[in-house]
Amino acid sequence: MPIQPKHLDEQFAKCYGEPPRWVVRAPGRVNLIGEHTDYNDGFVLPLAIDRAIWIALRPRDDGQVSVYSIDFNQTKEFSLDNLTDEKSGWIEYIKAVAWSLQEAGLEPSGWEGILVGDVPLGAGLSSSAALEMAAARAFAAVGNFDWDPAGMAKLGQRAENQWIGVRCGIMDQLISAAAVADHALLIDCRSLQTRPVPMPSGVAIAVLDTATSRGLVDSAYNERRSQCESAAEFFQVNALRDADLELFEQLAHELDETVKRRALHVITENDRTLQAVEAMCRGELAALGTLMNKSHQSLRDDYEVSSNALDTMVECATAHDACYGARMTGAGFGGCAVALIDASAADEFAVKIAVDYQQKTGRTPAVYVCRATAGAEIITGAGG
Ligand code: ADP
Ligand code: MG
């Protein structure tokens, strides 16, 4: 049974005097492996986590969208006839999706409802993509649109890029829209083809938030992107996705030392991601864990996007008996690590890692033990 936060129906009934017509849900995500590969047309392997945004709603026929956010304790409204960017916080994500639907020639209609979530904000678990995909699911329910996960993810990405002004790839929206319960999702960032990959039984995913911010990220990200582009040009391929180790070994001695290491990360990370899929399918947890550890080393030494806090967190995690492997996840320089752990020891692991990390760094981390859930869905209500 899909989950729903307690009391959301009741809250809705209290506000509107009847039960909601629909309750929709869209999850946050964490990337298991495949880091800094997306903009190289490569592979990523995220999973949707059991933390999500929920919206309980009913249709309106006056072209207005009105939403009460429980977490912000605010009601905000806008008219679909005249979408304007008022830079007014969380409602802009819903407006952005309405705009993107209109740009795609769909005709979203109005609704009102209540919004609540438990994806931590700004922690690297993509609460923004969860909100966008929940909004898209709501508009699709009200407008009776077909739910095409990849199409809706692209609309969400466009909303985030162009309305919110955040440059992001397709991964966050696509995993939130298209995830399958108890599976990770291999995404080919060139074709946008997806393949659900079963999570081996008996494991849990721990997201380990270092409680450090991601300050350097923008300038370093742009620099890494252009280094990858120049490496692709050097190897005479469209993107580093098309280079392999053989080509690298033939030619890399002529390449600038730094660019060479950047390319090596991307080429080996794409390989590791595909190997991780095989390991998962065969239930080879030790092999999967080793790939994650190697991914971290490559991000730390060759791509140089880790940080002391991330390295310390990964060391704390991998020192624990219950941990198969761990790595930084996300753009880097702070934010979260992800660890593959034995589910039966998850609680003990979470407590121990928090203590160890705090002792070593003086910072209090957040630890989220997660399992892989389904993507955006209607969990109450008929149709759509
Ligand atoms: P993240 O890394 O979590 O995606 P972002 O800064 O991209 O961080 O997005 C966070 C923003 O998404 C919040 O500032 C808020 O506007 C919106 N948001 C996320 N979760 C909620 C929620 N539960 N209720 C309302 N708005 C939310
Ligand atoms: Mg975001």
Image: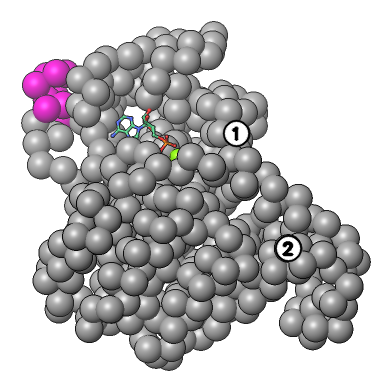
Label 1 sits on residue: 161
Instruction: Give the image quadrant in which the ligand numbered 2 is located.
Output: top left
214 shown above or below 135: below
Instruction: Looking at the picture, tell me which residue is in the foreground, 302 or 366.
Output: 302
| Drawn side of residue 116 relative to residue 165, left or right | left
Q: Which mark is residue 367?
A: none
Q: Residues within 10 Å of mark 2 (few under 14, many from 20)?
A: few
Q: Looking at the rendering, which quadrant does residue 66 occupy? A: top left
Residue depicted at 62% across the width and 68% down the height:
302
Residue depicted at 59% across the width and 40% down the height:
218
Which image quarter is the C terminus in? Answer: top left
> Given contact means CB atoms under 8 Å apart, are the residues at marks 2 and 1 in contact?
no
Residue 70 seen: yes
Label 2 sits on residue: 258
Residue depicted at 24% across the width and 34% down the height:
116
Q: For the residue labelled by badge 1, is the local secondary structure a helix, a strand or a loop? A: helix
User: How far from the left and from the top, in percent, is residue 113?
Assistant: 27, 24
| Drawn side of residue 148 relative to residue 246, left or right | left
Magenta segment, prevailing SS (helix, strand or loop): helix
Residue 194 seen: no
Amino acid residing under circle 1: Asn
The part of the chain drawn in magenta is 11-19
User: How far from the left and from the top, in percent, is residue 35?
Assistant: 55, 62
Amino acid residing under circle 2: Thr
Q: Nearer the viewer, mark 2 or mark 1?
A: 2
| Drawn side of residue 380 relative to residue 153, left or right | left
Q: For the residue labelled by badge 2, is the local secondary structure a helix, a strand or a loop? A: helix
Q: Residues within 10 Å of mark 1 (few under 14, many from 20)?
A: some
Instruction: Looking at the picture, tell me which residue is in the foreground, 342 or 366.
Output: 366
Spatial separation of the CA atoms under disc 2 and disc 1: 29 Å
Residue depicted at 24% across the width and 50% down the height:
363
